[in-house]
Amino acid sequence: MSPAHTPAAATGAKADAPAPAPVALPSGGTAADRISDRALASEAAGSAAQLRIALNLAWTLICGFLVMFLQAGFAMVETGFCRAKNASHTMAMNLMIYCIGLLAYWVCGYALQTGGLGGFPTLGGGSGLNCEVTVHLFGKAFGLFGAKGFFLGGPSLDPAVCVAFLFQAVFMNTAATIPTGAMTERLKFSAFVAYGFFMCGLLYPLFANWVWGGGWLSQLGANFNLGHGFVDFAGSSVVHLTGGVVALAGAKVLGPRLGKFNKDGSPNPIPGHHIPMAIVGTLILAFGWFGFTAGSTLAASDLRIGVVAVNTMLASAAGGFVAMLFMWVKYGKPDLTMSANGLLAGLVAVTAPCAFVTPFASVVIGSAAGVLCCISIIFVERTLRVDDPVGAISVHGLGGAWGAVALGLFADGSYGGGLNGVKGNVRGLFYGDGGQLAAQCVGVAIDVIFVFFAAYLFFRLLDRFIGMRVASDVEREGLDQHEIAVAAYPEFNLRQLPFGSGITPRPRQ
């Protein structure tokens, strides 16, 4: 969540509660003694405030480290769901999106996203990020992108800016990793590199600015009385819906894997090579997700973190369980891969509303996400005829959209006072504020429309000038053989490796 626009930052009551009034001192003593006592009290209050900021900085860093660990989970899920001949290529994309993404975000992405934010109150700094490029329409200011903080240099640099950079960068990396799962097993590595710079340096930061950087979607409440504006506590839309929509655009341009669809359009199953790896990756994601949600308070002193963490856990459990039941009833036996995707869909969906809803609502949100995920995966494959090897479009795209809308329904008014410059706590339709639901629907629609067309245009241009898809013979033999210099399972190869190793596997005895 945008540090300057968290409820804690807006109210000052959650993350950085005011220091308690000093205890009255006994009367008497000299004037100098009383002045000295006041100085000591003032120094103690300053030390307490400094301690709170230090705790908030440490909390945000630790949660950022947890989110960074999601990269390992994504790598295992995506690789487990692909075939053995493409395992190294899929792992390479998950590794290098971290490197490419961080560099692109450092150069310009962070500045575009947060360069006009105005500071991080709970972290005690960041006032140098004070330049937002805006346009004025209907007498209102519409923030478009930031213009301070490029290369993390200049007067905008301080400890708070660096901590916020780390925390926001791992969110960005998650969004950029999601589409690689939908495009795996046929994407050229050179095209992947170009995609990484575009996604992390430009596309993701722009939409993130509109929601978390003080941009125009966050101001729908202040400008047009639509609740508190578009609200996304930890990234159902900004991270996951954005990633899912880019995944859809990329998969559409790439086309399906060879052999996925018959001439009549009916799909053929292409099983992943290592389901246990994918399940371990799912559990890693569930663990690291607490950094996503609870960390978005940006304040260890915000007592709401307990509610956020419990809501996160319950929604994931509900999503996985209901997805298992759905497949069991529909097809006669539970599907482990669908259960894993249902669990992840529950996590994705609760990420936006987790701070604003009750535990019961979290179970409802997660349960609905589990069912929607199963239905969507079938729909994307059989009706849209889009080949998504890992279900990223459904888990993150539809799950993220549902989560953002769910906030507009279930927010109960117990949290969020002053968020985005609007008085009062955040309430959804079921608690008396239909305007919040309207703002959520506007935000989801903008995310889908803007991100899809921007990504689709980019992929079309990339395909025209570089080429996105590997040749058919490369795809048949495996991308490890041709695109990556290290095969995941070299003992499986039945031909001489083409990258100059000179190794020829021995025939089986």
Image (cartoon, grey):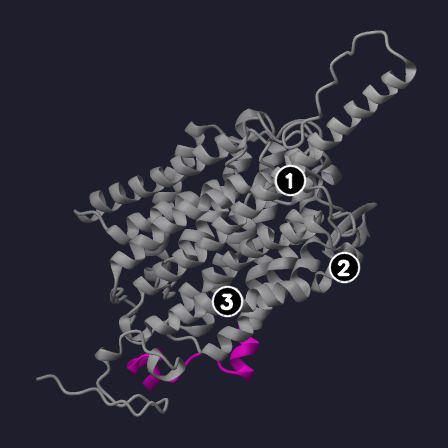
Tell me the distance, in whole angstroms, between the alpha carbons under discs 3 and 1: 31 Å
Cβ–Cβ under 8 Å for marks 1 and 2: no
In the rendered view, tell whether residue 316 sits above or below residue 504: above
Q: What residue is shown at x 25% (from left), y 63% (from top)?
A: 274
Residue 412, labelled with which disc? none
Q: Position of residue 469 (x, y in %)?
A: 43, 79
Give the mark nearer the N terminus: 2 vs 3.
Answer: 3
Is there any visible trace of residue 232 in the rendered image?
no
Please name the residue that numbered disc 3 is placed on.
97
Tell me how far mark 2 sits from mark 3, CA to CA. 24 Å
- Mark 3 burial class by Cα count in 10 Å: few <14, some 14-19, many 20+: many
At a point 36% along the width and 92% down the height, the residue shown is: 500
Magenta residues, dominant SS class: helix
Residue at the outermost left position: 509
| 147 left or right, relative to 67 | right
Q: Which residues are magenta?
A: 459-479
Q: Magenta span has 376?
A: no
Q: Quadrant of the C terminus?
A: bottom left
Residue 415, can we see it?
Answer: yes
User: In which quadrant will I find the N terminus?
Assistant: top right
The amino acid beneath tag 3 is: Ile
- The numbered mark, 1 or 2, whose residue comes first in the sequence reads 1
Mark 1 lies on residue:
54
Mark 3 residue element: helix
Q: Which residue is mark 2?
A: 147
Type of amino acid at the residue the image marks with label 1: Ala
Q: Is residue 311 above or below residue 475?
A: above
